[in-house]
Image (spheres, helix red, strand yellow):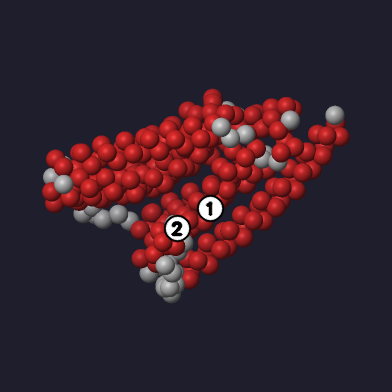
Amino acid sequence: MSNAVEAALILLREGLEAILVLAALAALLRRMAPERMGALWGGAGLGLLASLATAAAYIAWRDGVHDDTVEGITCLLAAAIMLWTGGWLWRRSDPRGWKQSLQRQAEAALAARRVAIAIGTISFLAVFREGAETILFLAALAQDGGWGGMVVGLLVASLGLAVLWVVLNRAAVRLPLGPLFKATSLFLLLMAARLVGAAIQEFQEQAMVGFEPADLPDWVVDIGVSPSWQGIGAQAAVLVLAGVVLLLARRAGAEAGSAAAAAE
């Protein structure tokens, strides 16, 4: 029974973040550019395959120990792409931008190749970052107690993640397009800050970055705030950068809205 519970908690903990990222992007694409859903699922599928290959390599050559440096670099890549995509989405969230002509422009922009590449890369990194570690944790757990009880826990956790997926997508369908763009944008920007903190922590475990512990409540660390001052500083820098991006995007959106109103 304990193996089942541990397996369920591992899958829920590691899978939750990937599900949230995929659900946010899927809800947006279904509304605005359903033809780009293939990029989302393709990236997620490649991320899963890469996770399996990476976990197999770790088991074969590193005794099942994952590489903190690789995970840190993966976090930074994902954060950079989320920052770009979050700012891009925010720029198209201005209420004046949802008149028919500008909505068509937003749809065309979402169909652009570079956006498909960004979406596919985000989904790949979201799944890859969590997938390999999940497989290694489960493999280690299976060595201790076998797969018998774990299967039940994994099925329960998978059902929970599936229910969460459905709930998030149904809730997103009810949102107007402007708020949906803003919500997705803010989520990606906050995730970028969280991933930067995770990257700093991985580098600290390799003694590549100094570590000065910050006395924070456990729940604050659990939501993604770095437990060190170095990580907090990096996260603060990302949030400041995100704020600048949002201000510039808001100004650009206001100018686009004014231009559209003048043209009418």
Q: Is residue 131 above or below residue 194?
A: above
The percent position of residue 102, horizontal first and vertical second, equals 72, 31
Q: Residue at x 46, y 55 (%)?
A: 195
Q: Earlier in the sequence, mark 1 or mark 2?
A: 1
Dot 1: element: helix
Q: Is residue 228 visible?
A: yes
Q: Give the CA distance from mark 1 to mark 2.
A: 9 Å
> Where is residue 115 shown, x and y percent of the image?
58, 36
Can residue 57 be seen in the rendering of this structure?
Answer: no
Three-letter code, disc 2 = Gly
Q: Residue at x 43, y 69 (%)?
A: 216
Q: Answer with left or right where residue 230 lies relative to residue 11.
A: right
Q: Nearer the viewer, residue 250 or 61?
A: 250
- Residue 223 percent coordinates (x, y): 44, 57
Quarter of the image for residue 131 reads top left
* Rendered residue at 66%/32% (across/down): 106
Residue 141 in the image: above or below residue 212: above
Label 1: few (<14), some (14–19) or many (≥20) C-alpha neighbours in 10 Å: many
Residue drawn 75% across the image and 37% down it = 96
- What is the quadrant of residue 128 in the picture? top left
- Left or right of 137, for residue 93: right
Tell me the amino acid under the disc marked 1. Leu
Q: Which residue is mark 2?
A: 224
- Picture quarter with the C terminus: top right
- Graded by Cα atoms within 10 Å as few (under 14), some (14 to 19) or many (20 or more), the crowding at tag 2 reads some
Cβ atoms under marks 1 and 2 closer than 8 Å? yes
Per the rendering, the mark at residue 145 is: none
Using residue 13 as the reference point, say whether residue 1 is left or right of it: left
Please tell me which residue lies in front, 208 or 29: 29
Residue at image mark 1: 190
